[in-house]
Image (tube, helix red, strand yellow):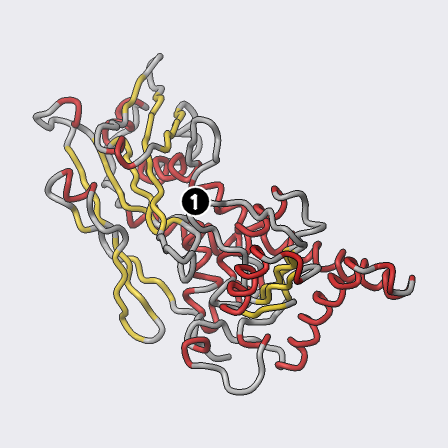
């Protein structure tokens, strides 16, 4: 049994309670939703998840589904495939609803070609489940198709995996590698000048963010050990739909660059902004993207224009800010700016002195802008 988009969600809901009606299910432009805190893709029958690489409605869930299906017992019974150059609408035929075309990413291939590519994935899954009724040649073709799909999917997901781990590494004491890079960006120094710098980040829950204070320690002259704190925040949906999987913002607590540069015996320089870290995040995402995705974005994508930070006059104004601020300039450009908070080194509360707090663009969210948000509803 197969379902497309919302039809896939309805199908898996029914089969989950009635596994005897199907030997397996096929989700096209759909996925197994994470509801009520359940992040497992264990399912009573085998499940194929096939999503087009240009599926503007579902692509964001593919990396998550790939990980959860692997954890559910391997990608043999629960394969997750990315279909080259196909989008969400191209599973269907006839008139496409406007809410789909407005969110989809344009495809360079025809509906007929897309149907063929989806069909190859579906056929290989069916053959694998019922090898006893197919010939050796058919089984061989199915296995080769699955091997090609697996290789393509794994390669396609590398940038998503890389960027995702920059938000939090998932360790027992979690850390964000992007925070470490962010502190270095604020310092505006070269590698040689930062040779004696070490940055350690701690990802903390929101309820601990207010009391977390970055620090700098020096065990020797012209050395600095900096501790930073961060809290990635994610969009939520009761239905687990229509939300990007990357952090909508990283609440970032850095040590003020003036203080750290002094510990490193470096002269004062004009201060950087959170904007500079966000620009670096987007540049990194562009470098992670495939040539095809990068070229497509540069050709048709909505470009981000990074504006100066809006500095909050007090702590709660930053801590409880709504995150990054986007505003449409025109059809081809969107402005983005951050809320920040700076306390001077001589701030009257010593424990809160010399801080630089930022709302940051995650490299993962920047990558999803390049692959999804910035290209939705466009034409080739």
Residue at the image point whose x is 33% and y is 76% from the top:
331
Residue at the image point whose x is 56% and y is 64% from the top:
11
Tell me residue 144's x, y (percent). Answer: 81, 59
| Residue 133 appears in the picture as rendered | yes
Residue at the image point whose x is 87% and y is 59% from the top:
132
Compared with 309, 357 (above or below) is above
Tell me residue 176's x, y (percent). Answer: 42, 36
Residue placed most toward the observer, 239 or 142:
239
Q: Residue furthest bottom?
A: 94
Q: Is residue 117 left or right of residue 295?
A: right
**Res 212 quadrant in image:** top left
**Res 266 quadrant in image:** top left
Q: Residue furthest left?
A: 348
**Residue under numbered circle 1:** 37
Residue placed most toward the observer, 206 or 46:
46
Mark 1 lies on a secondary structure that is loop
Other residues around mark 1 within 10 Å, as few (<14) / some (14–19) / many (≥20): few
Tell me residue 322's x, y (percent). Answer: 23, 51
Tell me residue 56's x, y (percent). Answer: 48, 67
| Residue 296 appears in the picture as rendered | no
Residue at the image point whose x is 40% and y is 38% from the top:
181
Q: Is residue 196 left or right of residue 109?
A: left
Quarter that holds the N terminus: bottom right
Compared with 125, 257 (above or below) is above
Q: Residue furthest right?
A: 136
């Amino acid at each position: 049994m197969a379902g497309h988009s919302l039809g896939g969600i309805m199908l898996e809901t029914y089969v989950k309670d009635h596994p005897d009606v199907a030997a397996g299910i096929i989700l096209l432009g759909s996925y197994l939703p994470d509801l009520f805190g359940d992040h497992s893709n264990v399912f009573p029958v085998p499940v194929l998840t096939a999503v087009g690489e240009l599926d503007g409605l579902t692509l964001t869930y593919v990396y998550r589904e790939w990980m959860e299906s692997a954890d559910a017992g391997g990608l043999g019974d629960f394969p997750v495939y990315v279909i080259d150059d196909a989008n969400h609408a191209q599973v269907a035929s006839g008139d496409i609803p406007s809410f789909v075309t407005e969110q989809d990413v344009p495809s360079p291939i025809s509906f007929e070609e897309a149907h063929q590519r989806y069909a190859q994935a579906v056929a290989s899954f069916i053959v694998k489940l019922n090898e006893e009724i197919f010939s050796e040649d058919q089984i061989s073709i199915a296995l080769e198709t699955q091997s090609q799909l697996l290789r393509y999917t794994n390669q396609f997901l590398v940038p998503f995996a890389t960027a995702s781990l920059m938000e939090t590494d998932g360790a027992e004491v979690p850390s964000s590698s992007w925070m470490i890079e962010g502190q270095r960006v604020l310092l505006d120094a070269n590698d040689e000048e930062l040779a004696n710098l070490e940055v350690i980040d701690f990802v903390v829950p929101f309820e601990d963010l207010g009391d977390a204070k970055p620090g700098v320690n020096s065990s020797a002259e012209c050395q600095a050990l900096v501790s930073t704190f961060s809290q990635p925040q994610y969009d939520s949906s009761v239905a687990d739909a229509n939300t990007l999987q990357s952090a909508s913002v990283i609440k970032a607590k850095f040590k003020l660059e003036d203080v750290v540069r002094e510990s490193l015996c470096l002269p004062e320089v004009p201060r950087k902004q959170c904007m500079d870290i966000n620009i670096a995040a987007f540049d990194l995402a562009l470098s992670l993207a495939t040539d095809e995705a990068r070229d497509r974005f540069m050709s048709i994508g909505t470009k981000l224009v990074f504006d100066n930070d809006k500095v909050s006059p007090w702590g709660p104004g930053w801590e409880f800010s709504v995150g990054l601020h986007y505003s449409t300039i025109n059809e081809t450009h969107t402005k983005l700016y951050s809320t920040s908070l700076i306390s001077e080194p001589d701030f009257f509360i010593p424990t809160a002195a010399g801080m630089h707090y930022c709302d940051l663009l995650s490299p993962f969210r920047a990558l999803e802008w390049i692959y999804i948000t910035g290209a939705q509803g466009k034409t080739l």
